[in-house]
Amino acid sequence: MSDDIKSRVRVHSKLTTVSSSPVGSGKTYPFTALDHAMGLHSLHVVFYYKANVFNDFDLDPSRISLSEALSLYPPVTGRITRNGDGNWEVKCNDAGVRVVKAQVGATLDEWLRSADGMEEKDLTVWEDMPEDPINWSPFRIQVNEFEGGGVAIGLSCTHMHADPTCATLLFKSWIDTHRGRAVAHPPVYSGSVLNARPDPNLKTNSAAYYSAKSAARAAPSVKMATATFKFSHAIIKQCLLGISETCPDATPFDLLAALFWTRVARLKAKAPGNDCGHALSVCTDFRKSWQEIPLPLGYYGNAVHFSKLSLVVDEINGFDLGRVVDEVHRHVSSIDEEEVRSGIDWLESRKGEGGRYGPALRMYGPGLTCVSMEHMIGPVGPNGSVVGPLMYDTAFGEEAEPVHVSYHVGNVEGEGLIMVMPSPEGGLGRVVTVTLPGNEFGELCEDHAILGLKPTMLLSGRGK
């Protein structure tokens, strides 16, 4: 928050939690080329619960179960250092995870209605990695208690360590351990799978796009604002039926990515000189999508791929929504294993003398970026039921699922970020979090095409 506004979140204590099983001496965890590329960003996840799931975290069994879960994750409790090649790695020394405890001067319902994206940052720890991080905890947990009951648990980490799927499964492993269940998706450390191939392919769209990112100049620093839109299963189903002739296989992500892209593009087209094209950087997860060497869902590290979809502004203005949905769907469907592996080949090709990786890239920027989390929705079961979204399968007890889960990325710059996530409602319901430059934010929140889908507005600051 800005210094002139008093925060409603008051930090009152800090502690360190270590794993219940000490790590063997000398164990290290090297980061991949893709991990290194994410080094400018951080990741922050907030899980909101109606009931206060802890009596006293210092003494609660949940702290013991956290220690037990951390024994599966030596890189989480370790510290970052440089190896002999000058690349980042984790020294798995079990130095522990910092835990921050705080009080919130509002009820949970008041907070979800009145807080904005900037104030929500106070529920997690936002720190850039220092130049010498050997004594710095790359993972932080913040336990925030609301007035009248309710708690928000914020998990923060370097994006070099984890992507949204990895961070979610770390938290879920804590939940599984706490409830005495087998950890559903234990971490799998197989970063060597993401090394360059003997015959690298640097002539794909992916390689060209990553190359362009490395050459892009930093965007001017502007004040960003964030809002969250919650869309119901019924309204998304109705919209998908309405465009079924144009794009019969459209997913909720295709629909919402196209909707927000077109609305943001119209806002940006008003800016002087913006009369050419508009591009969308699409971020997808490639766990379980490879055929040759499939990565399990529990793969620890980054398994995200960025690709570029371009349309000229006149086309966006002239297309009906169904046509843009079809363009998004075709693009996402076209991302195959070769495109992903070519991107990794290119990142590996940047190694300098001695094998040192190239500098980190601005992955979320400078163009508008849209993140898909469709893969976090479970498969259809034998009786036709669908396993709920991973981030909402995180109840500390029976019927105590989170009422909302927020995801944020640190150091987003340029045109902004759109994140399309599952909803606690399940089914086709989705939650969209949008971060835009402040001068565009207000107009988007009043956009008739978006409001026509009757979203519930959360954490937009508009309910004060």
Image: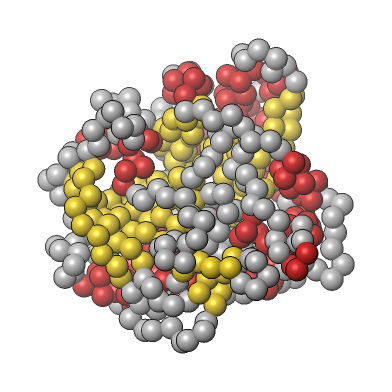
Residue at 44% x, 30% y: name it.
225
Q: Nearer the viewer, residue 315 or 43?
A: 43
Q: Position of residue 383 (x, y in %)?
A: 47, 64
> What is the quadrant of the C terminus in the image?
top left
**251 displayed left or right of 440:** right
How was this image coloured?
Answer: secondary structure
Q: Nearer the viewer, residue 441 or 179?
A: 441
Compared with residue 144, is residue 348 higher up or lower down, i.e. above or below? below
- Residue 51 visible, this orientation: no
**322 displayed left or right of 428:** right
Q: Nearer the viewer, residue 450 or 19?
A: 19
Residue at 47% x, 66% y: name it.
134
How many tags in the picture? 0
Q: Nearer the viewer, residue 299 or 367?
A: 367
Q: Position of residue 446 (x, y in %)?
A: 44, 19
- Residue 225 visible, this orientation: yes
**129 displayed left or right of 19:** right
Q: Quadrant of residue 289?
A: bottom right
Q: Position of residue 279 (x, y in %)?
A: 69, 32
Q: Position of residue 312 (x, y in %)?
A: 74, 24
> What is the quadrant of the N terminus in the image?
top left
Compared with residue 240, is residue 453 higher up or lower down, i.e. above or below? above
Residue at 48% x, 55% y: name it.
130
Q: Quadrant of residue 273?
A: top right
Residue at 61% x, 20% y: name it.
268
**112 displayed left or right of 377:** left
Outermost residue, bottom side: 24
